[in-house]
Amino acid sequence: MRKIIVANWKMNPNLLAEAKSLFRKVRQASQGVKNVTTVICPPFVWLPLFSKQKKSIFLGGQDVFWETQGAFTGEVSPLMLKELGCQYVIVGHSERREFLGETNEMINQKVKAALKAGLKVVLCVGEKTRIETKKSKVVSGVIEEQLQKALSGISTRLVLDILVAYEPIWAIGTGVADNPDDVLQASLLIRKVVAKLFSQEKAEKIKVLYGGSVTSKNVASFLAQPNIDGALIGTASLKPEEFSKILKIAAKS
Ligand code: PGA
């Protein structure tokens, strides 16, 4: 099974030359591996630099607005992302939920708008604390609520254009990743919700990624799980050597 590695550069790097250099190194690394879908999500302003030279790499936005155009200062439309060569977009990242006040309802509108424009959506869900993570596995918890709301009104025909990224917030950028067994449980829970909302077939086919302090040291343990199709990577995606190692490991998983 082809694994998917999504790089979320977040608000990095600050300098144009650094963005170009990082992209060049990542592209070289991705050209060397087969069997991995590599998606790079740089800040919006760097997207035009890469739109014409991707070849072995897919491009993604880190966010998108739900309207198609008009008086929405500071926002970026799905069609603008398409125009710049994006095939993917991250929606509902916990940092946007936390710092920009994005609600499940806003995320639902963004998912719908992105799918309508023909983008694939990397939909992020995850609990804030370890205690919530434990509870989520047994009672109807955070993941279920986030998924139900984000996927409300989505047509069954389009659901496989969504990749669900399970990212427990306590594991993001902390150097403390969740453990593979727990991630497997989360993946099964995500599939259960998808089965309830859509169908068993969609639940089996939908891609589920893990994100949260993924490194070259732990990525194999996640990708070895049968129900984990890839990883969403922040910090390690800014270090070309480390990211290159991750791609190579993903190719063998
Ligand atoms: P991290 O970020 O790899 O730095 O933990 C992951 C993410 O936020 O997508």
Image (spheres, rainbow, N blue to C red):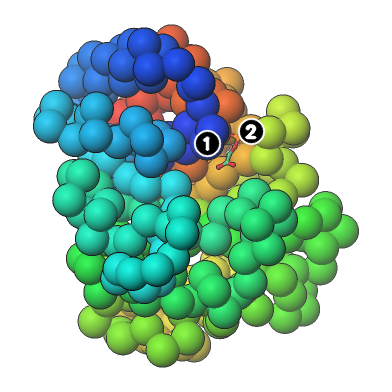
State the residue position of label 2. Answer: 213
Q: Quadrant of ligand 1?
A: top right
Q: Are marks 2 and 1 in contact (CB under 8 Å)?
A: no
Answer above or below: position of 51 versus 243.
Answer: below
Q: Does residue 120 appear anywhere in the picture?
A: yes
Picture coordinates of residue 1, whole percent (x, y): 28, 46
Q: Nearer the viewer, residue 157 or 61?
A: 61
Does mark 2 have its CB less than 8 Å from ligand 1? yes
Picture coordinates of residue 124, whole percent (x, y): 54, 58
Amino acid type indicated by mark 2: Ser
Q: Nearer the viewer, mark 2 or mark 1?
A: 1
Q: Is residue 197 rendered to the left or right of residue 83?
A: right
Answer above or below: position of 44 versus 198.
Answer: above
State the residue position of label 1. Answer: 10
Q: Quadrant of residue 23?
A: top left
Q: What is the quadrant of the C terminus in the image? A: top left
Picture coordinates of residue 59, whole percent (x, y): 27, 40
Provide the secondary structure element on which disc 2 rests.
loop
Picture coordinates of residue 212, whole percent (x, y): 63, 40
- What residue occupies the far right of the structure in this picture? 131
Q: Is residue 134 rendered to the left or right of residue 39?
A: right
